């Protein structure tokens, strides 16, 4: 019990729960403490409560436009779609609170031992699968191991969330028959032993969806994708809705799980209607909302900013503008000699007028964060980073220092060569690209826009690091911890920008290896300053996500679309 | 006659195989790696990316990939890279939607274009005839998705008399023709729209030519009234080239279905194909395109057969 530090966490209405939780913690400590044990730190229960839901009516159904996942088995999907689809019918041990802090879900409480070197999860005993079977710790162990199974190539991304668990890497490599760090001493306890601290374990790893072992345990992992339960037939979860059917390219039909452990959902049914990003489909979707064929649309199917007024004017609907999913940004390929000198990147940043984008393109409905952290993680955002914005004179001066001077056509030239830069991207570039093209032209940069479809851009250009300047947006708003995009997109050595900062890499690592949020914030603050000074990216803004939904449909207010989707259990019709 | 039909069917086989090779080559040339759209490689090691590619057969030599896809198409076991559903079941699920829309489109187009064509062919150079000639250009240059959106605005949003989307009520299961009918009106109109002037124009020319035939003069001289001559003698003969045009227009109809299914969010073959192309889901694209090729070939064979039905002289030859 050397250096034992335990955080006991038990949520909900804090006045009711804080005292019993504190007492139980003290009793626990008294039982297992020793002379050399460090005193426990309690996580204040009051800080994390759900927003109260007003009195609601039961009944009726809702049709919502939403992208479908590639499989209804959450461990076979990339995170970006399964994260908002799966919680309708599955649960994790934890779920995100209003600020993305971990709240209990299938685990009613947990202990953080040795600052996060191990965890003890105590599971709810009143949870049953949709087919009536009891949910147990065996399901948790099975799900996490199936995620990291050597035959589950598609689950590798989610498996990454468990790579710090003892034995996970060996198991993934096929060198072990189970993940040694996951233990189930009794049917309602899961113990996790880590190789190292992984700060987002509670927010990200433990929030991954749990599968029923009694259904999937009989299926070879390689065969899971083709199994009917991955396609909506016999899909069993613990979530507030049961899957009735999935018609590909049309709809996922859900019905209320009347035995849900937190009480039945207000709605009798929920239909998730497949959407497409193609412009004709956007127009069709808006019409469906206006005529009442669809009752709610958000996330990737949100109402475009230039249609907000039209939907607000329709008698049936309302608009709720939330913090958007994605920070739109420009990424320089620093392998290109043109961008080696930070003054070039700063000059282009000065040539960028972010307010013009916000007011002109996003009609004033956008937030701005100067870095790769979503506003939902406000604790990690440094508000005082340097921003090189909207100063054409400074831009021209910096270009001058680099030997670029304006020619008779107003375009910068050096050694008889014009400053002409290809600007490649997909999703979103077609809208903000022309604005940037005009802004940068004022400073003398000639931009060749190359807007492509996602498939043509993502693999062949961006992942292959063939971009010169790329227009990007990552759906950070879906991710429950700021670390998530850092690892893959910004960490020096792994990123595609070629940004190589020893301190940056160290800070990303440090921010992951401590579970103390204040300490993490300190590292993220410094990281944002380092990035802001190095300018590997230009942060443009986070256009708001405009949810359109029926006027008499009551949807609890949350800060982001992702958190709003997760309240589906509490939606209800006011007048039906 | 049987030998003729067997010969026609056998001729179609190399054509179809040629189409399959062409589609496969085009998919290989098109930029994009399907595996990077299945799991974000930013979070995977090189080995994991390799495993993912191997799991969907992308590491095999191209001839092996092609043969496996073709074998999968024949056995019905070819699966989507993305959803791992068999492409056969995806197509089976989409057929009622696409066929219903195309069928309604053809019926609407024939109902409107035949009378127009006959009327214009009867009086060449008349006001109606000139309108028809101009209409061909206007209609062909009018994008189907714009018409779709206009019709949705008018009939769904403003008048509220027709649904804006879907092939059936969203909470319905299965395909019930009665429930489907209101959902088919607008997609059917949009599908029919580009066909109407083309068919009317062909009918007009055929009617004009037929009116100059001796047997028409004979019919008039027998004392038959104009209506009987036109509908019983002229139109029946004039239909032969019109039917051949319908056969040629099948690819146009299937191409149009891609747009119509996007605008009206219909779960048909066109929508599956577009989604699969965006996501580089090669097996699905191969399957749907080759299925469309079968439809085009079959439509042409049916048209040849219908020649004989409409004009017994062809059957006898």
Image (tube, coloured by chain):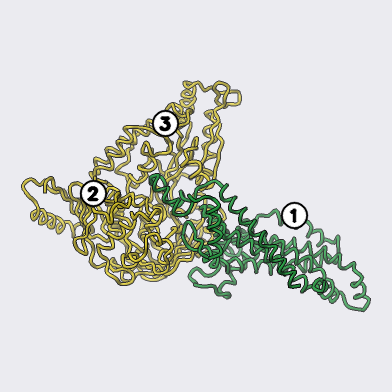
Chain colours: A yellow, B green
Residue B262 seen by the camera: yes
Q: Residue furthest left?
A: A35
Give the Cα distance between marks 3 and 2. 42 Å
Disc 2 packing (10 Å; few <14; some 14–19; many ≥20): many
Q: Nearer the viewer, residue A67 or A179?
A: A179
From the viewer's perspective, tell me whether residue B177 is left or right of residue B301: left
Please tell me which residue is depicted at 28% across the width and 60% down the height of the picture.
A140
Residue matched to label 3: A388
Image mark 2: chain: A
Q: Give me the disc on residue B137.
A: 1
- Asked where in the image residue A23 lies, by quadrant, the reply is bottom left
Image mark 3: chain: A
Residue matched to label 2: A194
Q: Nearer the viewer, residue A538 or A497?
A: A497
> Residue B317: image x %, image y %?
82, 71
Disc 1 packing (10 Å; few <14; some 14–19; many ≥20): few
Depth check, mark 3 against mark 2: the one in front is: 2
Instruction: Tell me the SS state at disc 2.
Output: loop
Give the Cα distance between marks 1 and 3. 53 Å
Residue A13 seen by the camera: no
- First reached walking from the N terminus: tag 3 or tag 2: 2
> Residue B94: image x %, image y %?
55, 66
Give the Cα distance between marks 1 and 2. 71 Å
Instruction: Tell me the SS state at disc 3.
Output: loop
As drawn, B182 above or below B276: below
């Amino acid at each position: 019990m050397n250096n034992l530090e335990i955080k006991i966490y038990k949520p909900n209405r804090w006045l009711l729960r804080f005292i019993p939780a504190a007492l139980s913690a003290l009793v626990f400590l008294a039982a297992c403490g020793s002379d050399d044990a460090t005193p426990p730190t309690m996580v204040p229960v009051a800080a994390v409560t759900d927003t109260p839901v007003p009195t609601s009516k039961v009944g009726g159904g809702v049709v919502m436009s939403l992208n479908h996942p590639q499989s209804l088995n959450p461990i076979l999907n990339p995170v970006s779609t399964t994260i908002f689809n799966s919680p309708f019918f599955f649960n994790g041990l934890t779920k995100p609170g209003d600020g993305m802090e971990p709240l209990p879900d299938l685990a009613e409480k947990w202990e953080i031992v040795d600052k996060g070197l191990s965890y003890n999860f105590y599971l709810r005993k009143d949870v049953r699968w949709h087919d009536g079977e009891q949910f147990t710790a065996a399901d948790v162990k099975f799900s996490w191991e199936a995620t990291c199974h050597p035959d589950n190539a598609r689950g590798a991304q989610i498996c990454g969330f468990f790579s710090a668990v003892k034995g996970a890497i060996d198991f993934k490599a096929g060198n072990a028959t189970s993940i040694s760090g996951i233990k189930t001493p009794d049917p309602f306890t899961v113990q996790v032993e880590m190789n190292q601290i992984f700060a987002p374990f509670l927010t990200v790893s433990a929030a991954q969806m749990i599968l029923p072992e009694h259904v999937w345990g009989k299926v070879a992992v390689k065969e899971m994708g083709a199994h009917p339960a991955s396609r909506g037939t016999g899909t069993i979860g613990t979530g507030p809705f049961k899957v009735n059917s999935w018609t590909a390219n049309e709809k996922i039909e859900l019905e209320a799980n009347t035995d849900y452990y937190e009480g039945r959902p207000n709605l009798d049914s929920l239909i998730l209607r497949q959407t497409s990003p193609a412009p004709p489909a956007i127009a069709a979707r808006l019409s469906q909302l206006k005529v009442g064929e669809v009752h709610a649309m958000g996330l990737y199917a949100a109402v475009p900013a230039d249609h907000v007024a039209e939907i607000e004017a329709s008698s049936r609907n309302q608009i709720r503008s939330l913090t958007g999913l994605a920070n739109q940004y420009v990424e320089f390929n620093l392998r290109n000699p043109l961008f080696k000198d930070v003054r070039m990147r700063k000059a282009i940043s000065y040539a960028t007028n972010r307010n013009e984008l916000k007011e002109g393109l996003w009609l004033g409905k956008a937030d701005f964060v100067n870095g790769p952290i979503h506003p939902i993680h406000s604790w990690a955002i440094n508000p005082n980073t340097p921003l090189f914005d909207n100063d054409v004179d400074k831009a021209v001066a910096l270009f001058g220092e680099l030997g670029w001077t304006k020619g008779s056509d107003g375009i910068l030239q050096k050694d008889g060569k014009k400053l002409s830069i290809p600007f490649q991207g997909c999703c979103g570039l077609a809208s903000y690209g022309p604005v940037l093209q005009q802004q940068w032209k004022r400073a003398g940069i000639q931009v060749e826009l190359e807007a492509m479809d996602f498939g043509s851009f993502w693999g062949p250009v961006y992942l292959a690091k063939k971009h010169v300047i790329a227009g990007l947006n990552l759906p950070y708003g879906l991710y429950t911890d700021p670390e998530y995009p850092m690892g893959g997109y910004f960490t020096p050595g792994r990123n595609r920008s070629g940004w190589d900062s020893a301190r940056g890499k160290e800070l990303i690592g440090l921010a992951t290896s401590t579970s103390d949020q204040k300490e993490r914030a300190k590292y993220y603050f410094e990281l944002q300053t380092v990035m802001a000074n190095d300018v590997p990216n230009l942060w443009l803004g986070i256009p708001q996500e405009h949810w359109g939904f029926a006027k008499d449909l009551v949807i609890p207010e949350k800060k982001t679309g992702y958190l709003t989707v997760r309240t589906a259990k509490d939606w209800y019709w006011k007048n039906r | 006659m049987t030998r003729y039909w067997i010969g026609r069917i056998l001729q179609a086989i190399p054509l179809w195989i040629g189409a399959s090779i062409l589609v496969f080559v085009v998919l290989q040339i098109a930029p994009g790696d399907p595996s990077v759209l299945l799991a974000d490689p930013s979070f995977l090691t090189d080995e994991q990316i390799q495993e993912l590619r191997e799991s969907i057969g992308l590491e095999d030599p191209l001839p092996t990939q092609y043969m496996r896809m073709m074998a999968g198409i024949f056995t019905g076991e070819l699966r989507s890279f993305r959803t791992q559903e068999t492409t056969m079941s995806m197509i089976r699920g989409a057929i009622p939607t696409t066929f219903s829309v195309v069928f309604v489109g053809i019926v609407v187009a024939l109902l409107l274009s035949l009378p127009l064509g006959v009327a214009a062919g009867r009086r060449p150079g008349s006001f109606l005839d000139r309108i028809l000639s101009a209409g061909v250009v206007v209609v062909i240059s009018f994008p189907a998705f714009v018409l779709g959106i206009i019709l949705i605005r008018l009939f769904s949003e403003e008048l509220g008399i027709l649904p804006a989307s879907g092939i059936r009520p969203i909470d319905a299961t299965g395909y019930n023709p009665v429930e489907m009918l209101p959902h088919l009106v607008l997609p059917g109109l949009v599908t029919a729209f580009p066909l109407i002037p083309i068919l009317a124009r062909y009918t007009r020319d055929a009617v004009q030519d037929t009116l100059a035939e001796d047997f028409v003069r004979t019919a008039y001289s027998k004392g038959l009234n104009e209506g009987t001559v036109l509908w019983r003698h002229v139109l029946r003969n004039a239909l032969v080239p019109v039917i051949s045009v319908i056969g040629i227009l099948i690819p146009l109809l299937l191409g149009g279905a891609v747009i119509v299914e996007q605008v009206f969010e219909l779960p048909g073959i066109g929508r599956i194909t577009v989604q699969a192309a965006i996501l580089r889901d090669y097996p699905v694209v191969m399957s749907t395109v080759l299925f469309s090729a079968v439809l085009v070939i079959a439509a042409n064979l049916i048209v040849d057969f219908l020649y004989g039905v409409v004009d017994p002289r062809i059957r006898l030859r």
